[in-house]
Amino acid sequence: MTSRRARTSVLIRSTRLLWAVLLAAPAAGATGERPFDAESPQTLPAGSVELEVAATGALDTARVLFPEDAGDQIVLPVVGVRAGLGDRGEMRVEGDVWQRFEGDSTASGPGDWTVATKIRLGSAQSRVGFAGIARMKIPVASDADGLGTNLADVDFTAVAGIHPGPVDVDANLGVAILGAPFRERAQIDLLTYALCVRGEMRPGLAAGMEIAGREGGDFFATRSVARAGVRWERRRMRWDAAVGFGLAAGSPGFELRAGATFLLGRPEAPAAAASLPASGGWTGSGNGP
């Protein structure tokens, strides 16, 4: 009986999470090539702008400042702006407008924001590409409610990608320098990683899988998540969705992402570059890059 009640409780929570994310509509996540965390070496063309709107939900995840408190979290909307700078650069700003955590206690409020820069190395036409990314977190979330640390964090990521044709492979390896809560003038360095394989199923529709996470340190737990996701592009909009499952004790037990990207001011790609993605590790198609 106890086991049946436990399964029923998980089913009810999962259903509530699914409806909350889908009704919040457009999609979620970290600062990756949505709906994944993994980054591609490609950057947006100069003068191009993308507006991202997203939502994300997780079951059995840890509260940021109180990692021993596991519960369910919804973040919506996640808003981001990406802009191409020159031939090799990209700037982005994104943040969690509102979030709610339900664990031993309930808390809600705004989330943190992130400013990032990506610099591509080498030619955009190369099938093997490299890039570097630097990010800085702007602390906004309340540390009193355990939704944030109230400390600025930075991380640096090296990106490598192989894009031979219908299947793309992207690998990320970096270091996150996090402010140590409850300690004066201290920091914790964590190793971050992501490996993603993505491919085009038909024009405008692509799917992929990834494993992404970080190696834990003092206070910050190890996180590792396996995700599968899809992305559909039509005219000047992209829709994406992904589900994830935790592979480590500090990871969400189940995660759902869904969202949309509006393509603004993107110039037409030259004919010679039409087969390469203008942004992300997704193969280009007749409906867009």
Image (cartoon, helix red, strand yellow):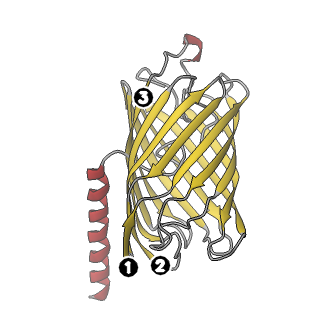
Q: Which amino acid does the dot numbered 3 rest on?
A: Leu
Q: To which residue does mark 1 refer?
A: 105
Q: Secondary structure at mark 2?
A: loop
Q: Secondary structure at mark 3?
A: strand
- Tell me which numbered mark, 3 or 2, is placed earlier along the sequence: 2
- Label 3 to label 2: alpha-carbon separation: 39 Å
Q: Which mark is residue 263?
A: 3
- Tell me which numbered mark, 1 or 2, is placed earlier along the sequence: 2
Q: Measuring 30% from the left and 47% from the top, which residue is drawn there?
A: 25
Q: Which amino acid does the dot numbered 2 rest on?
A: Asp
Nearest to the observer: residue 259 or residue 117: 117
Q: Nearer the viewer, mark 3 or mark 1?
A: 1
- Contact, CB < 8 Å: mark 3 with mark 1? no
Quarter that holds the N terminus: bottom left
Circle 3 residues within 10 Å: few <14, some 14–19, many ≥20: some
Q: To which residue does mark 2 refer?
A: 69
- Contact, CB < 8 Å: mark 3 with mark 2? no
Tell me: residue 269, above or below residue 22. above
Left or right for 161, reference 285: right
- Contact, CB < 8 Å: mark 1 with mark 2? yes
